[in-house]
Image (spheres, rainbow, N blue to C red):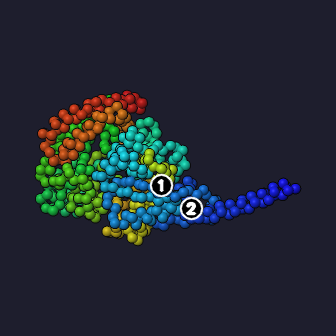
Amino acid sequence: MKSSSTVLKWCLLLLCFSIIAACSSNNNGNNKNTNATENTAATDTTNTTTEPAANNTAEEPAKEELPEVKLTFYYPSNPPGPDQQAVNDEINKYLKEKINATVDLKPLSFDEYDPKLNTIMAAGEEFDVAWGSKYWLLSYQANIDKGALLELTDDMISKYAPEARANIPDKFWPDMKANDGKVYGFPVYQVAAKTKSLVIQKRFADKYNLDVSTIHTYKDIEPFLKQIKDGEPDVIPFGMGMNSWGIYTSPDWVGTDGLAVSYKKDDANYSILTGEEQINTKKEYYETMHRWYKAGYINEDAPILKNFGDLEKKGNVAVGIEFTTKPGGEIDEMNNNGGNEVIYAPISDSYFTGVASAMQVISKTSKNPERALMFINLLNSDKYLYNLICYGIEGKHYTKKDGDYIEPIKDSGYAPNVDWVFGNQFNAFLKAPQTADVWQKTIDLNNSAMVAASYGFSVNQDPIKSELANTNAVNNEFATALETGAVDPAEIMPKYIEKLKAAGQEKIDQEIQKQWDEFLVKQGLK
């Protein structure tokens, strides 16, 4: 009997503990700040209000509690303004509710972004999320080869970023695959086609009766530049900097920034244009740039100006260049040009370059990769969070207008103007003069742009790593000076080509041609 009594007491005691535990679980389920789980990364992407929707936790089942973590997010940006921390604080309030995390936003200027991130990764410094691209800043394949980026498996994406993945058309997803067939980044879904355009301040185009429909190549703008030089002494006719050159286009080439190779349109064999051929083909272009530079059309400090945006924001650059012309993009360019209205003059075909031109990646050093992916999911699926990081706080940095339209408040203290960095741009508020159908027009452009044979091709750099490093140093020595017109091409081009050859350019060309031929065979084009 004594034994039975003891057993009975233990059973009663265990029953009490079970009741207490159940009550505790229900209390946690109603705690607004601790209900974030892997499943709460999902948000209603149809929500267009400027306030986060309240969590109806009373009707939700109890959820597993996640420990609070702090993330870091590096990205290139224009100077966001003195209210950067205030916006960061608002973002953290929201992230605490959604995924029980905070993030330290770390914007860097465009000129310092690559050097800074390269130093951080080389030192093995811990961080979580960064903005990257296929061929530009924080180059995708190069950093995969270095082992710096975390693979994002299908299971990870389906578990921690299902809403963001659902927004990416399946036909675009293969663009994210690296040379090994794996995925190491999440695309920032936006315009996936590139069209080079001249960006012209409308006030000068109106004053000098410029017919933009007559501008088809970079050469066509020269008479207008002379008018600006003669009539506007305090205005730079054509603005350039170290990070803004590259206006050359050719109707005979297939290729643009964002594609791995270029080839001639009439070449049935799709032979690549070698490094030397590309330089020689651009001889007339280099001569034109040099003539413009000597005539005072191009700002004198162009080859050494690290951040062209600083110059452009003063509003005294009549003509600039845009590499990714997109429907409604004039509003961003207006902000970049000191608030002066601008118009586009396209000077190239539109090429489909895929969704990998802009992405968010997770560092191999991240201690919280799952939460980092949940953060990426929110940036690319949650309208409130996306518009908060893009435009700041309603009433303080912008005014809400009818529908999805907002009006930025001038000199408000927060205006990074890099919507294409932060997340799915189709979730963005609209700003006049953007039309209500601007995002549909962007989707139509993605679907109608020319798809080059080189789409989907990327170079395995392993066999030519040292040569690429050597030729990159040579390009840094000569390319910017030639592209901005600061040097005489007759004198510099031979030296440039000679040094490229000595650095291993011919081996690079041969290896790329070999890989390119293999790709063409697989595609059934050879």
Locate residue 106 relative to residue 275 in the image: left or right: right
Q: Which of 340/509 is in front?
A: 509
- Residue 48: x percent and y percent? 48, 63
Q: In the picture shown, does residue 256 fall above or below 89? A: above
Reply above or below: 71 against 134.
below
Give the farthest residue toward the bottom: 395
Q: Quadrant of the C terminus?
A: top left
Quadrant housing residue 406:
bottom left
Kind of element beneath mark 1: helix
Tell me which numbered mark, 1 or 2, is placed earlier along the sequence. 2
- Tell me the residue at 50%/43% (across/down): 153
Query: Viewed as shown, does residue 18 lie left or right of 342?
Result: right
Residue 89 percent across, percent down from the top left? 43, 65
Q: Secondary structure at mark 2?
A: loop
In the picture of the structure, the residue carrying the numbered disc 2 is: 34
Q: Which mark is residue 375?
A: 1
- Residue 373 visible in the shown view: no
The x and y percentages for residue 111 are 28, 52
**Number of other residues with Cα within 10 Å of mark 2, as a class: few under 14, some 14 to 19, many 20 or more:** many
Q: Quadrant of the N terminus?
A: bottom right
**Amino acid beneath label 1:** Phe
Tell whether 380 sits left or right of 23: left
Q: Nearer the viewer, mark 1 or mark 2?
A: 2
For the residue pair 303 and 187, the one nearer the viewer reads as: 303
